[in-house]
Amino acid sequence: MTSTVTVRLTAVRKTYGTGSATVTALDGVSAEFTAGSFTAVMGASGSGKSTLLHCAAGLDTADSGTITVGDTELAGLSEHARTLLRRDRIGFVFQAYNLVGALTAAQNVGLPHRLARHALDPAEVTRALTEVGLADRAGHYPAQLSGGEQQRVALARALITRPAVLYADEPTGALDSVSSGVVLAALRRLVDTHDQTVVMVTHDPVAAAAADRVLVLADGRLVDEITGSGPAQIAARLVQGAVRA
Ligand SMILES: Nc1ncnc2c1ncn2[C@@H]1O[C@H](COP(=O)(O)OP(=O)(O)OP(=O)(O)O)[C@@H](O)[C@H]1O
């Protein structure tokens, strides 16, 4: 896997709308996602989690503040350069797996390369499927796979480009607890064995407990950081009301 990178946000502000309809989605957020670390982002609905993920990934632009991916500052990039950065260095996994039903697991995993018209070594597909524990399902179609297996195919598809950083937006949101556990274990393994940088938005304290630390957002600000997290610690914070997921 490629060497993964640190992502830094410094005093990032993002507003939507104008005049009296202005919404401040991010209100001066500074955070660092260290290379090889697994961060969960929690907070109430509307607290700015997705906006944070989208700005950090270069899907959206901040109004002010700086965001660097490794040595690259996003604000300095043209739209085209940002598109290439997203395509070549950033992986995404969303709640909906977005697999193509007419393609096998292996063909779905190879799709980013085909779309980018890059030559693809079949061994790369096998590697990515092996990393998520699905090498034996390469020839299966999505309808023949469980929800957790489909999400792991989506994860393998995100990994095929060897992303410097992997963003996951509610990756277990549509899964039962058993399938969630399998997907979270796959994410955890990527961090532990490949030093993958992972940033995951979640409402689920159990999912958040798989991360190394949890950042909590409220009204566009970072209000808490839980490190050395375990389910008990996060549950205790929930009881205290510090985390309103
Ligand atoms: N494109 C947009 N136009 C206007 N307002 C927006 C837009 N995107 C987000 N917002 C607003 O910005 C704030 C933060 O939204 P965001 O989606 O980041 O929250 P979130 O914490 O991810 O919420 P959820 O958990 O419900 O997905 C919200 O008040 C939201 O209504």
Image: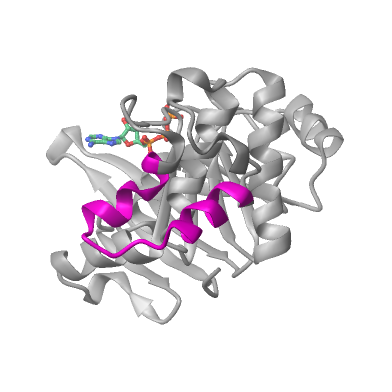
The location of residue 185, given as percent across then percent down, is 71, 41
Q: What's drawn in magenta, residue-wise?
A: 107-130
Front one among 72 and 193: 193
Question: Is 244 displayed left or right of 85 in the figure?
Answer: right
Front one among 127 and 45: 127
Q: Report how many numbered discs are placed on residues in the image.
A: 0
Q: Main secondary structure of the magenta part?
A: helix
In terms of image quadrants, where is residue 107? top left
Question: Considering only vertical position in the picture, is 105 above or below 114?
Answer: above
Residue ID at (81%, 35%): 231
The location of residue 209, given as percent across then percent down, is 74, 40
Question: Considering only vertical position in the picture, is 231 above or below 155?
Answer: above
The location of residue 51, given as percent across then percent down, is 36, 44
Q: Quadrant of the N terminus?
A: bottom right
Question: Is 181 displayed left or right of 7 in the figure?
Answer: right
Residue 242 visible? The answer is no
What colour scheme was applied to this rendering of the protein? one colour
Residue ID at (44%, 50%): 158
Question: Is residue 128 found inside the magenta-colored segment of the image?
Answer: yes
Question: Considering only vertical position in the picture, is 105 above or below 35?
Answer: above
Question: Is residue 226 found inside the magenta-colored segment of the image?
Answer: no
Residue 164 visible? The answer is yes
Quadrant of the picture in which ligand 1 is shown:
top left
